Image: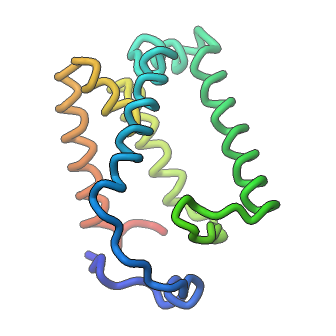
Amino acid sequence: MQNVDEFPETLIRENPGPVRPREPWTANLNYLIVGILFGIVFVKAEIISWFRIQEMFRLQSFHMYGVIGSAVIVGMLSVWLIKRFQIKTLSGDTVVFHPKQFNWGQVYGGLLFGLGWAITGACPGPLFAQIGSGYLGVIVTLLSAIAGTWVYGYLRDRLPH
């Protein structure tokens, strides 16, 4: 298992930015508010609906494809704007995009992720919105996702990358 305190040498060299003082805990209130608003949007758009997700995987409805396609377009446009105008974070940090290399582990991981999404009707973001909406059975899915993440971290060095 890889020690989380150790960073690859290339990562340390590529991002030597200044060490910022730790933000006060109240700074997390901004993230909490954005998260709550994001959850409300998920609920109102029916993104957390297990039935909508099942419709998507059965190719019966365009709803989720439209939502996901819109998110991809917004993400692409956002990255382009950040790079074009060198937009910084709210705390003034430069946004750095590291190049990604293809490996087959991404395909296997994506297939497992999609299988879990199809079975449970939730990916990591909607999990919290579903729990916040009162679907407490989804706590089992959340705990399973945490366990899966832990297993991946434990087996990471033995998996194809």
Q: Position of residue 49 (x, y in %)?
A: 41, 15
Q: Which quadrant, please, contains the N terminus?
A: bottom left
Q: Quadrant of residue 121?
A: top left
Q: Relative to the observer, which residue lies in front, 138 or 97?
A: 97
Q: Quadrant of residue 70?
A: top right
Q: Relative to the observer, which residue lies in front, 24 or 16?
A: 24
Q: Position of residue 96 (x, y in %)?
A: 63, 70
Q: Quadrant of residue 139?
A: top left
What residue is rendered at 35% in x and 42% in y? 32
Q: Is residue 4 placed above or below 38 in the rendered structure? A: below
In the image, taking residue 110 as reference, residue 100 lies left or right, namely right
Can residue 47 be seen from the camera position used here? yes
Q: Position of residue 28 (x, y in %)?
A: 34, 52
Number of marks: 0
Q: Relative to the observer, which residue lies in front, 7 or 81?
A: 81
Q: Is residue 128 placed above or below 160 in the rendered structure? A: above
Can residue 123 be seen from the camera position used here? no
Q: Is residue 99 placed above or below 9 in the rendered structure? A: above
What residue is rendered at 47% in x and 51% in y? 108
* Residue positioned most to the right: 84
Q: Is residue 148 placed above or below 119 in the rendered structure? A: below
Q: Position of residue 102 (x, y in %)?
A: 63, 64
What residue is rendered at 71% in x and 54% in y? 79
What residue is rendered at 56% in x and 82% in y? 15
Colour scheme in use: rainbow
